Image (cartoon, rainbow, N blue to C red):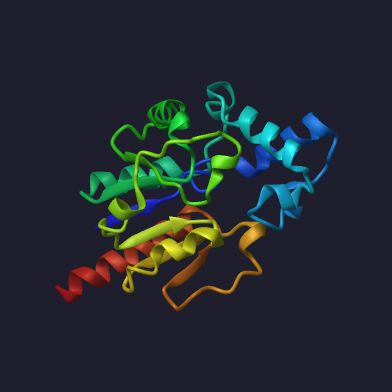
Amino acid sequence: MKIYVDFDDCLCETAGFFSGFVKDLFGIDVPYENIHYFDLKKSFSLTEEQYEEMMLKAHTPEILLTLEETPGASDVVNRWLDEGHEVSVITGRPYSAYEASREWLDRHGLSRIGLYCLNKYGRDSFIKNSDFSLELEDYYKMHFDVAVEDSPSAFRFFEHLPELQVMVYDRPWNREHAFPNGNYTRCADWMRIEEQVNQRICQKRKDQ
């Protein structure tokens, strides 16, 4: 099987970091559970200038390498790899963050997975003239059987794959969002994700 995995808030705890980071930068206190929008500018009620400052500082290698792993992520992904499945990380981070992101993956035992930077969210506003290593036209040529994603804003990138099974990592900003169809399953943690994906692997084998 070919498996798509998002980076932030699937592999690592990015929003929890931002909660403390924004408090330190601007004195704005928004606890993690109150981050109700994937749009962090909206969740933290930031000005455009504050948002750009926050995003620029947060995408430095010094910060990216300190993000904590989401519990169980690397163990589950490595079991998939050991079973012969192909796993690709498709992140909305700009290519300027690639080296630090690659190093983070390597440090967390995920050196065997591919990493692609896709302009999912039009974030050129905080890093001017950003480059991305995966163009949309090339992304749409890729095939995936399963996706692990937390952002409702990214669901539109799955519309070309009608059979794709999407594991939605349960986060405060996606709990009120209606899923596009029955292929979406809410998962509280990586144990649940692995359980759901394994069920689909077994079903696919039976169907072959």
Q: Residue furthest top?
A: 62
- Rendered residue at 31%/58% (across/down): 140
Please count the marks in the image.
0
Q: Nearer the viewer, residue 51 or 207?
A: 51
89 vs 63, left or right, is left
Task: Say if residue 52 shows up in the picture.
Answer: yes
Residue occupying image coordinates x 19% and y 68%: 205
Occupied quadrant, residue 17? top right
Q: Nearer the viewer, residue 160 or 35?
A: 160
What residue is at 80 percent from the left and 46 percent from the top?
A: 30
Q: Which residue is drawn at 29% across and 63% down?
A: 145
Q: Is residue 204 found left or right of 23 in the rendered image?
A: left
Q: Residue furthest front?
A: 129
Establish if 141 lies above or below 13.
below
- Residue 111: % across, % down: 32, 32
Quadrant into which the C terminus falls: bottom left
Residue pushed farthest bottom?
Answer: 182
> Is the N terminus in the top left, top right, bottom left or bottom right quadrant?
bottom left
Residue 94: horizontal and vertical position, in percent?
Answer: 47, 37
Location of residue 12 in the rendering, given as x and y in whole percent from the top left corner? 53, 40
State the image coordinates of residue 146 (x, y, percent, origin top left): 34, 61
Q: Is residue 13 visible in this depiction of the protein? A: no
